[in-house]
Image (cartoon, rainbow, N blue to C red):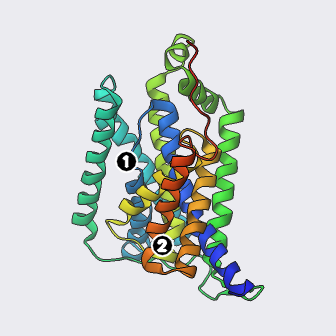
């Protein structure tokens, strides 16, 4: 295989992996704040794509306006999920909350099917579809948008958690919710904020990926599974690991499609994940749990 084909697969893998990483980051934010794995995260990705398509193709809204509106609508959906489904049963065991998020995922997917139908929808690329040649590889302009927006979003989250009061309060809740409440931090408010941020991240990932892969009401199932796999691959609870795990998973998937067959690209990525977890269960960047006895 020549270098241009390899570069093509790498760019494709990084493009898809960026979305997986954003989805995994949504899992991580909610897990760090609540200790819950939110299996409705994939539906946030789907909603971002479907809302943007609806706004542009049905309501005639311009893309620069449709993108923030779709992200805002998904973020409000995340707030409703926390307020109506999670907060009333907050004291239940974590496994009960996980099952509730699975039910929320099914509900959102069903409502999306009723509202938008079962058809596959497409969103026009942000800056045309004329490929850019880089060292012999044809790169779609949308891939640059995906990579650039992913980097901007990750940088913004890093600054949010390290410089803002709200971000530091969320980190405090992730370390010790009881201690955080004793110093005046509204833990419930931080939990809602975590759902809103994770929904926003998922929506942005869905919006920027839709011009490449298209979208439908059931698109969130596989994206959610791959985002969760990326989260585990990088190390559950590690934001950097989540982003890195998504990139690694995307590259493995793309190389698998190129060297083996596109029919087995999903299986190859998950097989590598299983092998890694046998060798290092805490993930690539996770830390082993230690208890003093």
Please, is residue 5 above or below residue 96 in the view?
Answer: below
Q: Residue furthest front?
A: 279
Q: Nearer the viewer, residue 24 or 147?
A: 24
Please, is residue 91 above or below residue 67 in the view?
Answer: above
**Residue denoted by label 2:** 265
79 lies left or right of 146: left
Percent x, y for residue 248?
Answer: 61, 60
Question: Can residue 66 be seen?
Answer: no
Please, is residue 238 above or below residue 56 in the view?
Answer: above
In what quadrant of the picture does the N terminus appear? bottom right
Residue that appears at 53% across and 71% down: 63
| Mark 1 closeness class: few <14, some 14–19, many ≥20 residues within 10 Å | many
263 lies left or right of 131: left
Percent x, y for residue 8?
Answer: 66, 81
87 lies left or right of 31: left
Of circles 1 and 2, the one toward us is 2
Residue that appears at 53% across and 41% down: 236
**Residue denoted by label 1:** 39
Percent x, y for residue 90?
Answer: 34, 26
In what quadrant of the picture does the C terminus appear? top right
């Amino acid at each position: 295989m020549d270098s241009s084909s390899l570069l093509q697969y790498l760019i494709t893998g990084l493009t898809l992996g960026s979305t997986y990483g954003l989805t995994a980051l949504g899992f991580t934010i909610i897990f760090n704040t609540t200790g819950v794995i939110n299996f409705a995260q994939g539906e946030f990705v789907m909603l971002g794509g479907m809302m943007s398509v609806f706004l542009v193709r049905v309501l005639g809204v311009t893309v620069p306006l449709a993108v923030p509106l779709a992200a805002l609508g998904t973020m409000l959906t995340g707030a409703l999920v926390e307020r109506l489904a999670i907060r009333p049963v907050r004291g239940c065991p974590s496994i009960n909350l996980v099952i509730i998020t699975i039910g929320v995922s099914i509900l959102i997917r069903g409502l999306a099917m009723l509202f938008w139908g079962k058809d596959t929808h497409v969103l026009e690329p942000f800056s045309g579809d004329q490929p850019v040649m880089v060292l012999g590889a044809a790169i779609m302009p949308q891939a640059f948008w995906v990579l650039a927006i992913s980097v901007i979003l990750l940088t913004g989250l890093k600054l949010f958690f390290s410089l803002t009061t709200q971000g530091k309060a969320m980190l405090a809740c992730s370390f010790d919710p009881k201690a955080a409440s004793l110093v005046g931090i509204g833990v419930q408010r931080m939990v809602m904020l975590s759902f809103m941020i994770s929904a926003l991240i998922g929506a942005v990932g869905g919006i920027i990926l839709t011009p490449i892969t298209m979208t439908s009401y059931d698109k969130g199932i596989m994206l959610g599974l791959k985002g969760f796999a990326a989260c585990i691959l990088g190390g559950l609870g590690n934001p950097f690991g989540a982003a890195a795990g998504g990139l690694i998973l995307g590259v493995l998937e793309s190389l698998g499609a190129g060297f083996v067959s596109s029919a087995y690209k999903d299986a190859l990525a998950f097989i590598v994940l299983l092998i890694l977890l046998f060798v290092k269960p805490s993930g690539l960047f996770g830390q082993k749990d230690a208890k003093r006895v």
